């Protein structure tokens, strides 16, 4: 079974049995709002350190319903944003080699990632080489003709060069999410689904609890891991006004052309022409890397964007032109104004923590982000990264 494909695409996620909390406790040391990959990873890393008096509240009936369940599941240790790259590198180590007993099967299908660039982006990508070497990332620099020799469906005219990452590939998002949750639950963390946070109790600048459709829960530490809704939750708390932008991204899945064995193909992304494709279950997936600004919502694919995807395929990899679609889905990638993540205690409301703005890399970075957030909640500091880069306080002086 291709585990990696199980959690790619809306509606494909089925929950393994995980017992929800049924007792009447309503007082916790920490409450996490949102059970996507961010909330789940934080719960795991808190519990690992014996900090298990934690309640996760999720509005939907199952974890991972929104962005987490709709990602392309790619682990690519390359990024033009240096802080995001740092977090990816840290996260990749865990995904490649999780602690013994963490998951029942490997979390990564090492099928490779081919990142292609043209023009100024190729100049910028080449500058990453020393960083990748320093981080011992395995990679190969490829010329346009070398790319075409390896993958004849790609024309050399749409790229100036590529970086091939043979040890990267597709993450088993389903396995990662549920491993975090299972291990956290085993250590005492509680999860309640179908519970929507509708208000936050703050007195004299200290948060004290949340109001929900299932009553009030008390806690002096509340973590905002609500994905596209982090801005809404921030407003409920009267916290710093950070202008997060949820952006929709669309993916289509279709059969590979007859006679073409795409199974061993890497995930291919053309950053300059905003297009990616790669193997998905028995066929292919593709995205026009759209990023339309939308209100937080249960995102659905837009017909125009689907048509745009087909146009990109026709222009960039015409041999792959689909006869029909097997499925299509969309999800939201949520960014802070400077595109760096927002992790740490709010400058206005004590005990209110942000775990937000993971954009399009929240799955691969989740092990790093979860550990950093756990450090900040438990100790108030971290030595894994310069916490000032991630701190919500950075928006204060703007
Ligand atoms: C199409 C697409 C492709 C992507 N591809 C990749 C990729 O290849 N690699 C990668 O690393 N990342 C990828 N990403 C990004 C990644 O999916 C996200 O960064 C990540 O899932 C964000 O996780 P999250 O937990 O913050 O958000 P979510 O998964 O959205 O979780 C937030 C949760 O909070 C809950 N919530 C919101 N408000 C409330 C409330 N009031 N009360 C209770 N619960 C609430 C929501 O119901 C939701 O379940 C992709 C994203 C998309 C959309």
Image (cartoon, rainbow, N blue to C red):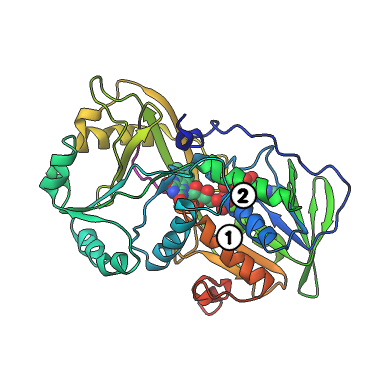
State whether residue 337 is above or below residue 24: below
Using the rendered image of the protein, determine whether residue 248 is visible from the camera's viewpoint: no
> Does 178 appear above or below 131?
above
**Extreme residue in the bottom direction:** 397
- SS for tag 1? helix
Q: Is residue 104 magenta?
A: no
The reply to whether the C-beta atoms of the residues labelled 1 and 2 are less than 8 Å apart is yes
Residue 59 horizontal/vertical position (percent): 70, 44
Range drawn in magenta: 284-292
Q: How many marks?
A: 2
> Compared to 237, does 383 lie above or below?
below
Residue underneath mark 1: 370
Separation of marks 1 and 2 at Cα, in angstroms: 10 Å
The residue positioned 29% from the left and 57% from the top of the image is 138
Residue that badge 2 annotates = 180
Of pointers 1 and 2, the one earlier in the residue sequence: 2
Dot 1 alpha-carbon crowd within 10 angstroms: few under 14, some 14 to 19, many 20 or more? many
User: Residue at coordinates 68% horizontally, 51% vertically from top-left?
Assistant: 184
- Residue situated furthest right in the rendering: 24
Q: Is residue 121 visible?
A: yes
- Quarter of the image for residue 78 reads bottom left
Where residue 233 appears, as percent x and y from the top left, is 67, 57
Q: Nearer the viewer, residue 68 or 210?
A: 68
């Amino acid at each position: 079974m291709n585990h990696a494909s199980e959690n790619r695409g809306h509606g494909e996620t089925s929950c393994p049995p995980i017992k929800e909390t049924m007792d009447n406790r309503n007082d916790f040391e920490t409450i996490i709002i949102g059970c996507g990959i961010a909330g789940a990873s934080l719960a795991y890393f808190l519990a690992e350190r014996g900090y298990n008096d934690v309640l996760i509240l999720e509005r939907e009936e199952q974890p991972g319903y929104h962005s987490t369940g709709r990602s392309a599941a790619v682990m690519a240790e390359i990024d033009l944003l240096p802080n995001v790259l740092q977090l990816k590198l840290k996260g990749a180590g865990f995904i490649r080699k999780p602690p013994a007993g963490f998951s029942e099967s490997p979390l990564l299908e090492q099928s490779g990632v081919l990142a292609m660039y043209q023009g100024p982006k190729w100049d910028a990508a080449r500058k990453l080489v020393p960083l990748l070497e320093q981080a011992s990332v395995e990679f190969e620099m490829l010329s346009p003709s070398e790319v075409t020799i390896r993958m004849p469906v790609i024309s050399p005219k749409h790229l100036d060069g590529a970086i091939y990452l043979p040890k990267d590939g597709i993450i088993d998002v389903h396995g990662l999410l549920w491993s975090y949750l299972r291990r956290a639950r085993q250590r005492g963390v509680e999860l309640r689904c179908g519970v929507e946070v509708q208000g936050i109790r703050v007195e004299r600048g200290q948060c004290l609890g949340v109001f929900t459709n299932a009553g009030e829960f008390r806690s002096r530490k509340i973590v905002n891991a609500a994905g596209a809704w982090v801005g809404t939750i921030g407003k409920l708390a009267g916290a710093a006004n950070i202008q997060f932008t949820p952006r929709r991204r669309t993916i289509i899945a279709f059969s590979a052309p007859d006679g073409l064995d795409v199974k061993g193909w890497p995930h291919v992304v053309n950053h300059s022409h905003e297009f990616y494709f790669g193997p998905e279950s028995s066929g292919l997936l593709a995205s026009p890397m759209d990023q339309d600004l939308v209100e937080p919502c249960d995102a659905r694919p837009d017909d125009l964007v689907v048509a745009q995807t087909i146009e990109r395929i026709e222009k960039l990899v015409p041999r792959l032109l689909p006869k029909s679609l097997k499925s299509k889905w969309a999800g939201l990638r949520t960014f802070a104004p400077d595109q760096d993540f927002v992790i740490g205690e709010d400058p206005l409301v004590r005990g209110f923590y942000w775990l937000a703005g993971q954009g399009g890399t929240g799955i691969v970075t989740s092990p790093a982000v979860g550990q950093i957030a756990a450090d900040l909640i438990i100790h108030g500091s971290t030595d894994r990264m310069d916490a000032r880069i991630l701190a919500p306080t950075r928006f204060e002086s703007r």
